[in-house]
Structures are given as C-alpha cells and as structure tokens.
C-alpha cells in the first residue's frame, strides 16, 4: 500500500553531508505535487538545494518557518477533510544542542508554532536524554503530534546511494510505522523499528561503539601482519575467510588501496569524520555507564578517537584514519604495482 499521497508537504532541517542527499532522494522520488520546505543555519546550503530543485524544494527562514509551512497545508487538508494526511518534518543536524535548538528554541523552534497532528522525525545521532526531552515536550504541548528518533547508518556514500539503514525509535505496533517506513524507504534501505522512544538511538550508539572498536582492532591486526611481512591484500582475504570477517575489513578497510572504494583509498577524504566517531563513541560510553553496562574497551577506544580527532593529520578525515593515528604503514602500495 502506498502512502505517497500523505507526503504532499514536508519540512527538512539540516542540509549537511547526510541531510542534503537524503533531501535529494525525497525531491526525486515523492510525487510531482509534493513540496519540501528546507532550512539550515548556513543559508548557502538552503539556496543550493532550492536551486537544484526549483519550485519543488522551497526556502524557509527558520525551523519554525518550516513547521509553519507544513502546518499551512494542514489547514487546507482539514478543509478538504483529508484526515489521513499527517505532514512531516525531518531533521538531520549534528548534536543534541542543535536538536534542542531546532525543536525547542522559544522564538524559532519547530515547537514554537502549532504542530498538532504532525510527524516529527529526528535522524541525528544524539544522546537519548535530549531526544526524550524533545519527545516529552512535544507530547505535553501537542498531544496529537508524534516525535520519533530515527538515526541512520551507512555513511555519506550510503546517503547518496540511498542505502542507509534507519534505526527507528518506535514499537512494531505503532500506528505510524507504515507511513514512517514508506518515507524513510525513499531515502534508504532497511527501516528497523527498535521497540520504543529513544531505542533507535540506543541501537545506533551501540552499533557505532562496535564499529569503532572493530576499526581499531582491524588497524592493529593489519599492522602487525604487515610488519611481519604479509601483503595487506592477503591479510584481507584471510580475515574474509576466517573468523575475523567483518564489514570494516571488507568494505571500509583502514589500510589504503586494499579495497578501492574504501575511504582510506581516497586519502580518507570521504566518509564518516573521525570527530563524529569521537562524538558517537563518547555518547555510547556515557550510555553504557548510565545503564550499568560493563565496558572494558570504552576508555581505551574513547582515548584513541579523542587523540585522532585532535590530531591535525587525522582531523576531518574518515574515522578509519585511526589506522594512520596508530602508526599503520601507508606506503606499502608500490609492491602491489609489481614494482
Ligand atoms: P554536517 O555537519 O555535514 O551537517 C549538519 C548540518 O546541520 C549543517 O549543514 C549545519 O549547518 C546544520 N545545522 C546545525 N545546526 C542547525 C540548526 N540549529 N538548524 C538548522 N541547521 C543546523 O553533519 P552530517 O555528517 O550531515 O551529520 C548529521 C548527523 O548525522 C550527525 O548527528 C551525525 O552523527 C549523523 N551521521 C553522520 C554520518 C556521516 O557519515 N556523516 C553517518 C551517520 C550518521
């Protein structure tokens, strides 16, 4: 069953490395009559998106303005008695403080206007407490509106390809699940309902903890093998065939030029910035402490990503640059050219 008719007017807030390609999928895939109002604190991002999809993606002056534009359709919808329509705002901003500002700023936030009946979906990776605070505020002030955490995994490349996974903070029995799944399916691949509010974030943070630890272990394992005389391509085959098989080794190999599409092969320029991994890793370690989970690798992982995020040789590069931070060999490649 299609729900495309329910998304005639949307809002999208945060047009950065992830948000912009996610918006592009919506602009390309929603029905022609759909309109998307966008806002970013960097006005140029808004202007660029509007220029790319003229007449379809429209400029808003603030997060509140985005919500108001979406609300204005609701008046029309009510007039036509199209009661199934539930307009939607999606946000994709860096941190909890930005999410608070987007939704709760008393002058310019989404919740500073009437958002009754709206679906609000925050895809940012933030702490669960902030997400629950926004959800509770929405529930108290606008009981007919619904706020969901729905962080994503798959990186910038996945956002561009439309293959990101969504970890949705809602129960399988949630009445909005089908339309949420439809909308997120336009921007990505899998949509996994994680059980309830903030559990999408809890899932995402534990995933990034695991992924971050694997990248460190992978960097160390490659390095010890290479320093013992092994070609990293041989090591990659061994890991893929053995019990160490994992996606970081296979597709995001920290050693340059083992897997041509890995960020490392392009100088780590494209991918998931090491500062973002530092942020997510820290949020995961905090979460582990809060819920009483024993966590022996947390401190060393945090220290490592903290160091890499503050190292000028690594900062702003893909997080698998942790291989460089740990002193891994980058100049092995001449051997691969038969030299
Ligand atoms: P980004 O910095 O590239 O983009 C964020 C955008 O939000 C920027 O354009 C910024 O100007 C805008 N912004 C900041 N505060 C705002 C506000 N108050 N109102 C409106 N716009 C505001 O970051 P990104 O890489 O797109 O990441 C966004 C979120 O997605 C983060 O929480 C990140 O952890 C998560 N994430 C990123 C990746 C990745 O590979 N980049 C992968 C998965 C998840």
Image (tube, rainbow, N blue to C red):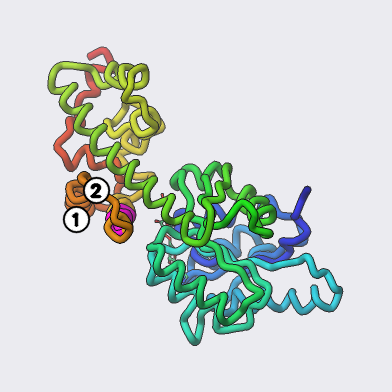
Q: Is residue 78 left or right of residue 306?
A: right
Q: Is residue 89 magenta?
A: no
Q: Position of residue 167 (x, y in %)?
A: 51, 50
Q: Which residue occupies 46% across, 47% down?
A: 153
Q: Quadrant of residue 248?
A: top left
Is 206 located above or below residue 15 in the figure?
above
Q: Position of residue 207 (x, y in %)?
A: 39, 45
Regarding residue 96, the answer to whether it shows in the image is yes
Q: Is residue 269 left or right of residue 308?
A: right
Marked residue nearer the N-terminal end (1 or 2): 2
Q: Which mark is residue 209?
A: none
Provide the residue designation for mark 1. Answer: 310
Q: Which residue occupies 36% across, 21% down?
A: 240
Provide the residue designation for mark 2. Answer: 295
Q: Which residues are magenta?
A: 279-286
Of residue 18 and residue 213, the one placed in the foreground of this image is 213
């Amino acid at each position: 069953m299609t729900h495309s008719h329910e998304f005639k007017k949307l809002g999208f807030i945060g047009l950065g490395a992830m948000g912009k390609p996610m918006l592009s999928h919506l602009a390309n895939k929603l029905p022609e009559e759909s309109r998307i109002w966008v806002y970013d604190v960097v006005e140029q991002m808004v202007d660029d998106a509007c220029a790319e999809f003229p007449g379809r993606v429209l400029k808003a002056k603030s997060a509140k303005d985005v919500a108001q534009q979406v609300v204005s359709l609701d008046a029309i919808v009510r007039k036509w008695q199209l009661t199934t329509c539930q307009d939607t705002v999606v946000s994709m901003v860096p941190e909890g403080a930005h999410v608070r500002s987007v939704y709760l700023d008393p002058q310019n936030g989404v919740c500073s206007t009437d958002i009754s009946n709206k679906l609000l979906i925050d895809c940012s990776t933030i702490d669960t407490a902030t997400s629950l605070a926004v959800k509770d505020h929405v529930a108290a002030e606008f009981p007919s509106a619904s706020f969901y955490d729905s962080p994503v995994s798959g990186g910038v490349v996945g956002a561009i390809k439309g293959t990101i996974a969504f970890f949705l903070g809602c129960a399988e029995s949630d009445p909005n699940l089908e339309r949420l799944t439809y909308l997120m399916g336009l921007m990505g691949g899998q949509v996994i309902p994680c059980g309830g509010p903030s559990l999408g974030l809890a899932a995402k943070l534990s995933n990034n903890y695991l992924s971050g630890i694997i990248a460190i272990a992978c960097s160390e394992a490659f390095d010890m093998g290479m320093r013992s005389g092994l070609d990293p391509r041989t090591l990659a085959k061994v890991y893929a065939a053995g019990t160490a098989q994992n996606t970081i080794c296979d597709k995001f190999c920290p050693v340059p030029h083992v897997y041509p599409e890995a960020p490392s092969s392009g100088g780590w320029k494209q991918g998931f910035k090491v500062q973002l991994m530092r942020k997510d890793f820290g949020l995961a370690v905090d979460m582990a402490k809060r819920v009483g989970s024993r966590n022996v690798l947390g401190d060393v992982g945090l220290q490592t990503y903290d160091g890499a995020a503050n190292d000028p040789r690594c900062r702003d590069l893909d997080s698998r640059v942790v291989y460089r931070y740990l002193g891994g060999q980058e100049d092995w490649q001449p051997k691969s050219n038969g030299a």
